Image (cartoon, rainbow, N blue to C red):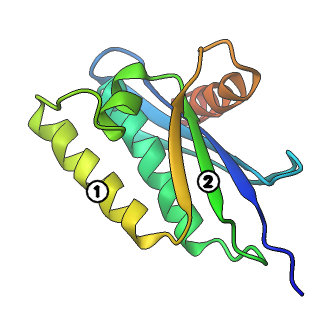
Amino acid sequence: MKKKCSALFVYTDGGARGNPGPAAIGVIIFDENKKIIKTHKKCLGKATNNQAEYKAVIKALEILKKLKTKPAPSKISFFLDSELVCKQINKEYKIKSTNLRVLNEKVNKLISDIKAKITFHNVPREDEHIREADALVNEALDEHN
């Protein structure tokens, strides 16, 4: 009998230098043994911090959709330091910005395409893995300049 992968852990960060300004994203995906299975960094061009945070979550979900882990995970836990984005995704905060509403709808569509229980957690910026995702954001921005 195949063992079902019980969990994946996803840490995302997005940031902009200026608000709006040059922006980038960082994504780190760990397996249930806390082994990194995928990282991603990308410069976005001009965006706000909140847009970058959402785009990091979107990119992580796109990666997860294509990820061929055997067996497939039953649970995926996201961790991000943006309270606003986390609580909007969890439907605890209303979304006033049209731009963020569009990004939130894209997140929800991608979540519905993935056959796992997905949860979103707000963690402090000091979290070790959030700092690693933030480092990817800064690397992408530094490489772009």
Is residue 13 placed above or below 74 in the rendered structure? above
In the image, 58: left or right of 79? left
In the image, 121: left or right of 40? left
Residue 39 appears in the rendering: yes
To which residue does mark 2 refer? 76
In the image, 68: left or right of 25? right
Around disc 1, counting alpha carbons within 10 Å, would you say few (fewer than 14), some (14 to 19), or many (20 or more)? some
Query: Residue 89 location in percent, x, y?
Result: 34, 40
| Closer to viewer: mark 1 or mark 2 | 2
- The quarter of the picture where the N terminus appears is bottom right
Q: Which residue lies furthest to the front in this view?
A: 1
Q: In what element is the residue under mark 1?
A: helix
The residue positioned 29% from the left and 17% from the top of the image is 19
Query: Residue 59 location in percent, x, y?
Result: 48, 54
The residue positioned 52% from the left and 45% from the top of the image is 119
Q: Real-space Cα distance between discs 1 and 2?
A: 18 Å
Tell me whether circle 1 and circle 2 mark residues in contact (CB < 8 Å). Answer: no
Q: Nearer the viewer, residue 87 or 26?
A: 87
Q: Which amino acid does label 1 sit on?
A: Lys
Query: Residue 65 location in percent, x, y?
Result: 53, 70
Is residue 6 placed above or below 120 in the rendered structure? below
Residue 45 appears in the rendering: no
Around disc 2, counting alpha carbons within 10 Å, would you say few (fewer than 14), some (14 to 19), or many (20 or more)? many
The residue positioned 73% from the left and 56% from the top of the image is 7
The residue positioned 36% from the left and 24% from the top of the image is 49
To which quarter of the image does residue 4 belong? Answer: bottom right
Query: Residue 12 location in percent, x, y?
Result: 56, 37
Q: What residue type is labelled 2?
A: Ile
To which residue does mark 1 refer? 106
Q: Nearer the viewer, residue 76 or 134?
A: 76
Q: Which residue lies furthest to the bottom in this view?
A: 1
